[in-house]
Image (tube, rainbow, N blue to C red):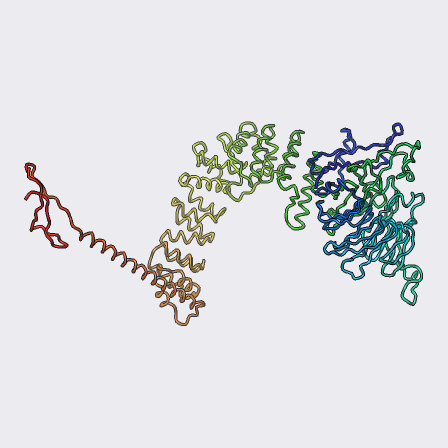
């Protein structure tokens, strides 16, 4: 959709009338730009000083319907429109019915009338479109077949309505009316004067004629309600009556400057007299109660429901213009003043008492030349959310789509007015409701990145205003765990010398900033804010009470002058200590931490990670620290270090019942049999027992494992399936006690036999490969030895005779036993 329509939120017209010189009030709509994605929600007052009005948030958002509609309207003009959830149906002054998709693209057209189409109705299934025209015809076109029945009348037809579920009923009734002064239901008519509008909902038909609005009950074939026009109303033919069923029982009427809301109700049984035929002969069984009635200072060109409120499309008369003068042209040659240009139409939202809620001025194409009857308001109600209700404002050369503003629009409006705090509060509230609904996080159409941008703008505005305390308090929910952003804003607070305000809110336990940022924080406090290290308020803040589950959850500040340990972001602080043991000796740090075993563990653990040999004097103490604070890493430490007392370590593990560590230490001390018993009896893990025997590589230990396992069927199965080539499975099978029930023994034996067969097959294959390779190599050797060998003898330096070959009978080849031919002197 093209969004080049400007809208303006304005006060009610009564408030905006000018008292200056008796001139009429002029509210200029803001002209749109061609590249607008959304309609401007700007104030109609171009005075920048009117801040209160410009901050009023509109209720609706608008977009201009584009597609191929613009091309269609270059040669024709819209006279009426109906909408469904799948398409739009337009009637034009040239008598053409256009079927458009919801984006405004032409899908189909019916050139079925020769004059202006006054009304269009779409059946509930969206399969038939009925049109009524000044040519006196009612034509019902099928969108999916060639069916198009026509009903011809003598006079112009002003309105038409199809019965509910028209496409699924055999009766296929419709009602129509016009200047022929009768309402006709598929051939059956009743003279009630000219009919100007009709709406059929469920079992009720409402229509408007010169006298007022009447309601007919199809089930009882009885008119049961008459709603007269207010006293002083203009002629019925001057302004079109707008009828709208809000639901099956609520009728909304907007006619000229009058609005009425009626509700269908059941009459008390005592007031209803039923005849012998079962038809009421007294008062009708139903009646309509008017629950809302008020007059307006504008002409109602359309009416529709919005939640518990009313949407009115209004036409504002020029000052001095009365109801009777509108649409009446001056006679030729008269001295009557030239007709004034029209005001732009407005959308008014009012409550059920007619009190003003909001209104927008719409800059439609050519509005200066249109009157009240040129505009129409169609709407498509939502079956789920009220915010999905869609309104269509129709003029001869333009169609605008309006929707209630949702949460995303509300947030965007607040951001456009630099009301960042309210925008963030709206996002936070939406997130809470979203989590309660389905456990997810609200993102909206803006996305997380845009929400973050709002927060950053908010922080920037607070910093610009010097509100550093509130800015610091807001950082956690805006920056969350983005380390880069925390670095950026840390430098920002340092730049204004307000780091001490921000520091309590930095989530050191959840983020890892770069080294330079940590060093900047530490240096800043050591150089210029050392008192903050001892500040009780800061010590009680989040920085000093962060998580303490392991390395990287805090930091340490130590100097030669300040012999205290403080946590201040702590991963980088510990790293500084372990990397500079020349300036912060290990002995000194351990002494400082002697009364704080948790922090001693953090420090010694970091030191061991950095250099295993730096703190070897404290490895025995570390065994106890790991056992108390991080037992999951104790076994790795025991395997990596050899500088602790094994017996002491074992006793510590035994006190804390750390069985895997006890097994490792027993094996290290040579007590393999006791270690194996622990694995079998305490851990019950046959795989770990096998691995332990593999590590020790002791044949006697294998025998012990087999012996200890003979009364444990799961261990027997585990041994048979996992021994592999380390122990002959026959040895295990022979030691199984006779009569011992062993589940899954059969499958284990089958697995062993299968594995054995595979091993034998592999061995046979390897043997064949070896034999083949040996034969090939032997043949190669044989042929290489069979070849002749050239041997050169020694020649005398003084010999001048020519070279020749001679045979030496004493030299023979050891393969073919032939004599050698030697080149040389005879």
The spot of residue 823 in percent (x, y) is 10, 44
Query: Which of the 4 image quarters holds residue 613?
Result: top left
Query: Which of the 4 image quarters holds residue 67?
Result: top right
Query: In this rendering, does residue 648 appear at all?
Result: yes
Query: In this rendering, does residue 380 appear at all?
Result: no
Choose between 27 and 331: the one closer to the eye: 331
Give the mark count: 0
Choose between 89 and 754: the one closer to the eye: 89
Choose between 754 and 429: the one closer to the eye: 754
Horizontally, residue 610 falls left or right of residue 826, namely right
For the view shown, which residue lies furthest in the bottom direction? 739
Which quadrant is home to the N terminus?
top right
Horizontally, residue 767 falls left or right of residue 530, namely left
The spot of residue 184 in percent (x, y) is 87, 55
Please say if 60 is above or below 136. Answer: above
Please say if 318 is above or below 804. Answer: above
Please say if 315 is above or below 188. Answer: above
Q: Residue at x 43, y 60 (%)?
A: 681
Horizontally, residue 23 falls left or right of residue 443, namely right
For the view shown, which residue lies furthest in the front direction? 114
The spot of residue 563 in percent (x, y) is 50, 33
Choose between 139 and 177: the one closer to the eye: 139
The spot of residue 44 in percent (x, y) is 78, 33
């Amino acid at each position: 959709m093209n969004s080049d329509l400007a809208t303006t939120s304005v006060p009610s017209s009564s408030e905006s009338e000018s008292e200056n010189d008796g001139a009429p009030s002029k509210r200029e709509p803001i002209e749109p730009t061609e590249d607008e994605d959304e309609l401007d929600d700007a104030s109609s007052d171009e005075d920048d000083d009117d801040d209160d009005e410009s901050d009023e948030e509109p209720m609706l958002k608008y977009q201009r319907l584009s597609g191929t509609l613009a091309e269609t309207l270059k040669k024709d003009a819209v006279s009426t429109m109906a909408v469904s959830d799948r398409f739009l149906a337009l009637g034009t002054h040239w008598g053409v019915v256009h079927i458009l998709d919801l984006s405004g693209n032409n899908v189909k057209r019916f050139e079925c009338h020769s004059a202006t189409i006054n009304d269009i109705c779409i059946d509930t299934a969206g399969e038939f479109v009925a049109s009524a025209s000044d040519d006196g015809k009612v034509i019902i076109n099928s969108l999916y077949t060639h069916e198009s029945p026509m009903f011809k009348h003598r006079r112009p037809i002003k309105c038409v309505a199809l019965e509910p579920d028209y496409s699924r009923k055999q009766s296929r009734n419709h009602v129509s009316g016009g200047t022929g002064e009768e309402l006709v239901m598929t051939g059956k008519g009743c003279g009630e004067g000219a009919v100007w509008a009709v709406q059929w909902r469920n079992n009720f038909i409402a229509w408007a004629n010169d006298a007022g609005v009447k309601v007919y009950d199809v089930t009882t074939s009885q008119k049961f309600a008459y709603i007269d026009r207010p006293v002083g109303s203009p002629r019925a033919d001057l302004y079109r009556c707008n009828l709208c069923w809000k639901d099956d029982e609520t009728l909304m009427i907007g006619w000229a400057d009058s609005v009425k809301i009626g509700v269908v109700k059941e009459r008390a049984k005592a007031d209803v007299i039923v005849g012998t035929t079962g038809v009421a002969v007294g008062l009708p069984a139903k009646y309509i109660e008017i629950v809302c009635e008020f007059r307006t200072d504008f002409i109602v060109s359309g009416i529709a429901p919005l939640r518990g409120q009313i949407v009115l499309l209004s036409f504002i008369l020029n000052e001095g213009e009365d109801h009777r003068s509108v649409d009446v042209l001056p006679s030729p040659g008269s001295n009557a003043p030239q007709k004034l240009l029209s005001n732009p139409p407005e959308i008014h939202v009012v409550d059920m008492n007619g009190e003003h809620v909001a209104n927008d001025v719409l800059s439609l194409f050519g509005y200066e030349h249109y009157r009240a009857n040129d505009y129409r308001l169609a709407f498509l109600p939502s079956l789920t959310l009220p915010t999905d209700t869609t309104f269509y404002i129709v003029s001869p050369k333009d169609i605008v789509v309006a929707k209630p503003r949702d949460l995303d629009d509300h947030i965007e409006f607040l951001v456009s007015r630099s009301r960042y705090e309210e925008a963030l509060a709206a996002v936070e509230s939406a997130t809470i409701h979203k989590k309660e609904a389905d456990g997810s996080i609200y993102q909206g159409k803006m996305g997380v990145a845009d929400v973050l941008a709002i927060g950053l703008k908010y922080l920037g505005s607070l910093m610009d205003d010097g509100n550093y305390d509130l800015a610091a308090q807001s950082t956690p929910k805006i920056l969350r765990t983005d380390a880069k952003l925390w670095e950026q804003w840390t430098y920002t607070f340092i730049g204004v010398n307000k780091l001490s305000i921000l520091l309590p809110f930095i989530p050191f336990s959840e983020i890892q900033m770069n080294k330079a940022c940590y060093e900047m924080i530490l240096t800043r406090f050591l150089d210029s804010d050392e008192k903050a290290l001892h500040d009780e308020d800061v010590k009680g803040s989040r920085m000093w009470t962060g998580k303490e589950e392991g390395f990287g959850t805090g930091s340490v500040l130590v100097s030669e002058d300040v012999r205290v340990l403080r946590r201040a972001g702590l991963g980088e602080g510990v790293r500084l200590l372990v990397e500079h043991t020349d300036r912060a000796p290990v002995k000194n740090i351990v002494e400082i931490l002697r009364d704080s075993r948790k922090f001693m563990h953090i420090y010694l653990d970091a030191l061991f990670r950095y250099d295993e040999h730096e703190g070897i004097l404290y490895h025995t103490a570390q065994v106890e620290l790991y056992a108390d604070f991080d037992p999951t890493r104790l076994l790795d430490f025991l395997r990596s270090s050899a500088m602790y007392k094994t017996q002491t370590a074992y006793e510590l593990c035994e006190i804390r019942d750390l069985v895997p560590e006890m097994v490792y230490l027993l094996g290290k001390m040579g007590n393999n049999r006791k270690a194996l018993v622990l694995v079998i009896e305490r851990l019950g893990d046959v795989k770990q027992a096998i691995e332990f025997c593999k590590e020790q590589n002791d044949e006697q230990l294998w025998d012990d494992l087999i012996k200890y396992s003979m009364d444990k069927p799961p261990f027997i199965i585990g041994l048979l399936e996992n021994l592999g080539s380390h122990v002959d499975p026959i040895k295990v099978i022979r030691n199984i006690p006779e009569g011992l029930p062993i589940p899954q023994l059969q499958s284990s034996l089958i697995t062993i036999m299968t594995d054995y067969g595979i091993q034998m097959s592999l061995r046979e294959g390897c043997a064949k490969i070896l034999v083949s390779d040996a034969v090939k190599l032997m043949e190669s050797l044989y042929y290489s030895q069979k070849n002749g060998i050239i041997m050169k003898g020694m020649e005398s330096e003084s010999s001048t005779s020519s070279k020749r070959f001679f045979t030496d009978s004493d030299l023979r080849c050891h393969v073919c036993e032939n004599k050698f031919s030697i080149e040389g002197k005879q």
